[in-house]
Amino acid sequence: MSATREKDGRPGKPSGKESQPLIIAKTPAEEQRLKLERLMRNPDKPAPIPDRPKEWNPRAPPEFVRDVMGSSAGAGSGEFHVYRHLRRREYQRQDFLDKMTEKQKMDLDYLDKVSDNQQAADERTAKRRKKREKLKHKKLMAKKAKQEANNVDDSEKSSSSGEEDDQEREADDDAEAPSFVMGKR
């Protein structure tokens, strides 16, 4: 025997891949596990993703139907079957069109509902934003009032005889002070 002969007995073939034992899946979960293991053996290889199946469309109605007498008197024995098949196809086509119309209506209803929900969410967000900004403004006004009160106390202590300072301060302080201060009890 030569040195190139491997375990499987084929000469000249190096065993790059070990032969895998045949495993028969007994459950769907085991089958899925085996498929995943096979895919993960070579992660560089692209996984096969099947295309989405095309939606069934009925055949277009015939432009002109010749000599179909239907089940009326005088029709031959084969004419009734032709009539019956045409009638069945037409009923299928009408059912398909009805279902498509219903589906389109449901899609439009869904889109309307989504837009209504989005609009309601935007309104709630705007209302909450307005409330936050109002609170922020109140806090800012309270902070300014507190700083002005501290400045007034400091300036009264430093310049008790400065009437000119009082006139300048009154000219600068045209803004109304808030009627309440947050955080004080």
Image (cartoon, helix red, strand yellow):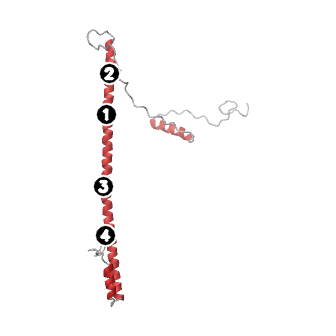
- Provide the residue designation for mark 1: 101
Q: Nearer the viewer, residue 185 or 182?
A: 182
State the CA–CA distance, disc 1 to disc 4.
56 Å
State the CA–CA distance, disc 1 to disc 3.
33 Å
Q: Amino acid at mark 3?
A: Glu
Whichever of callouts 1 and 2 sits on the residue coming sooner in the sequence is 2
Where is 146 relative to 99, above or below? Answer: below
Quadrant in the picture for residue 88: top left
- Provide the residue designation for mark 4: 138
Q: Which residue is found at the position 33% from the left and 50% from the top? A: 118
State the CA–CA distance, disc 2 to disc 3.
52 Å
- Tell me if label 2 and label 4 are in contact, CB under 8 Å: no
- Provide the residue designation for mark 2: 88
* Quadrant of the snapshot with the C terminus: bottom left
Element on which disc 2 rests = helix
Q: Amino acid at mark 2?
A: Arg
Q: Where's residue 34, x and y in %?
A: 51, 37
- Provide the residue designation for mark 3: 123
Q: Where's residue 143, x and y in %?
A: 34, 74
Q: Nearer the viewer, mark 2 or mark 4?
A: 4
Q: Nearer the viewer, mark 1 or mark 2?
A: 1
Where is 148 relative to 86, above or below? Answer: below
Whichever of callouts 1 and 3 sits on the residue coming sooner in the sequence is 1
State the CA–CA distance, disc 1 to disc 2.
20 Å
Q: Where's residue 139, x and y in %?
A: 33, 70
